[in-house]
Image (cartoon, rainbow, N blue to C red):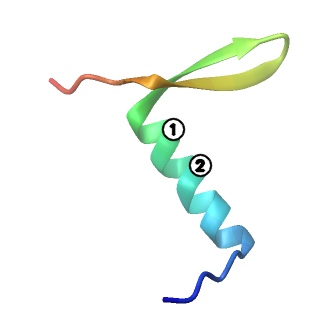
Amino acid sequence: MQASGGSGDSSAIASWVAAHYTARTVGGVTLYDLTTPRTSG
């Protein structure tokens, strides 16, 4: 398996993180707490 490392990959990762974790803005920067996934339902 070969990793492409392109910008499309980082965009896909960012979209997945945004869909599964809650964003918090701290000092004008958006952060995601990857230790606490969103709950469904």
CA–CA distance between discs 2 and 1?
6 Å
Q: Which image quadrant: the C terminus?
A: top left
Of the numbered discs in the image, which one, if any, rests on residue 14?
2
Asked if residue 39 lies left or right of residue 36, the reply is left
Q: Are marks 2 and 1 in contact (CB under 8 Å)?
A: yes
At which x and y percent is residue 18? 51, 38
Q: Residue at x 84, y 10 (%)?
A: 27
Which corner quadrant of the image does residue 23 belong to? top right
Check disc 1 and report the residue beneath it: 18
Q: Residue at x 45, y 29 (%)?
A: 21
Question: Relative to 32, is 24 above or below?
Answer: above
In the image, farthest residue toward the front: 1
Q: Residue at x 61, y 68 (%)?
A: 9
Q: Nearer the viewer, residue 5 or 25?
A: 5
In the image, farthest residue toward the left: 41
Which corner quadrant of the image does residue 12 belong to? bottom right
Q: Nearer the viewer, residue 34 or 41?
A: 34
How packed is label 1: few (under 14 Cα within 10 Å), some, or many (20 or more)? some
| Circle 1: residue type | Ala
Question: Relative to 18, is 24 above or below?
Answer: above
| Circle 2: residue type | Ala
At which x and y percent is residue 4? 65, 83
How packed is label 2: few (under 14 Cα within 10 Å), some, or many (20 or more)? few
In the image, farthest residue toward the top: 27
Task: Kindly state the secondary structure of the residue where label 1 is placed.
Answer: helix
